[in-house]
Amino acid sequence: MTGVLAKRWKGAGSVFLLAVTLPAQAWGQTVSNSHPIALQLDSCMAESPSGSRGMLDCAKEAEAAWEEEVERLTERLSSVLGEEAREALESSDLAWRASHDADLTFIDAYHDQLEEAELGDPELVMLSRQIHRNAGLEIRVSRLENFLAGLEDIPDTIPEERIPPP
C-alpha cells in the first residue's frame, strides 16, 4: 500500500464496512422496492450465499435489466410527448447519460481506491461497486415512471369536440 493511501485509509476498517453496507441500504431506500427488477434482485440475492460471487452475478444481471428499463421507459415517454416536450426529454436524456457516465467513473475510482488500500473482502468491494452502479439506473427508472404516471389520465386521442376546426 502506498504511503498516501496508508495515511488516508489508516484506521478506516470500520469506514470500509460502511462503504460496503450503506450502498445496499441506500439502494433499497432511494426508490420503492416494488419494481419487478428490484424484487428479482432481492430474490436472487437471498438465494445466493452471503458475500458470494453469485450475489455479484445477481447485481450485474440487475444492471442490465435496469439499463433496458431506462431505454424502454425513455422510448415510451418520448412516444407520448408533444414535439417540444420530446425535444426537452432528448436533452434531458443526453445530460443524464453524461452525468451517469461521470458517476460511473467516480464509482470505479472510489472502489479502485478501496481495492488498492486492501480494505475488506475483495468480493464485497466488487459487490458494493455493482450496487452503486445499479442505484443510478434505478433512480432514473423511478423518475421516468413518475413522468409516465402523470400522463396516465390523459386520453390517447383528443376528443373530436376539442379539435379546432381547420
Image (cartoon, rainbow, N blue to C red):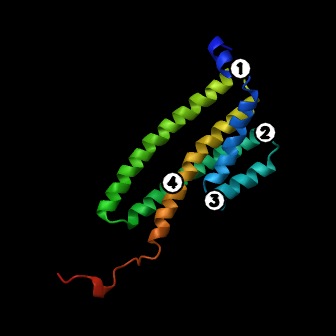
Q: Distance between the residues labelled 3 and 1?
A: 37 Å
The amino acid pointed to by label 4 is Val
- Nearer to us: label 2 or label 3: 3
N-term-proximal mark, 2 vs 4:
2
Residue lying furthest left: 166
2 or 1: mark nearer the eye: 1
Tag 1 or tag 2, which sits nearer the N-term? 1
Q: Which one is in front in this view, the residue at disc 3 or the one at disc 4?
A: 3
SS assignment at label 2: loop
Measure the C-alpha gap from mark 2 to mark 3: 25 Å
51 relative to 114, above or below: below
Quarter of the C terminus within the rendering: bottom left
Identify the residue under disc 3.
32
Residue that carries the numbered disc 4 in the rendered image = 70
Q: What amino acid does circle 3 point to?
A: Ser
Q: In which quarter of the image is residue 19?
A: top right
Q: Which of 165 and 135 is in front in this view?
A: 135
Residue visible at 66% across and 26% down? 114
Q: Residues within 10 Å of mark 2 (few under 14, many from 20)?
A: few
Question: How many C-alpha atoms fall within 10 Å of the one at disc 3: few (<14), some, or many (≥20)?
Answer: few
Query: Can you tell which of label 1 and label 4 is closer to the viewer?
Result: 1
Residue placed under numbered mark 1 in the picture: 10
Q: Would you place residue 95 above or below residue 35 in this image?
A: above
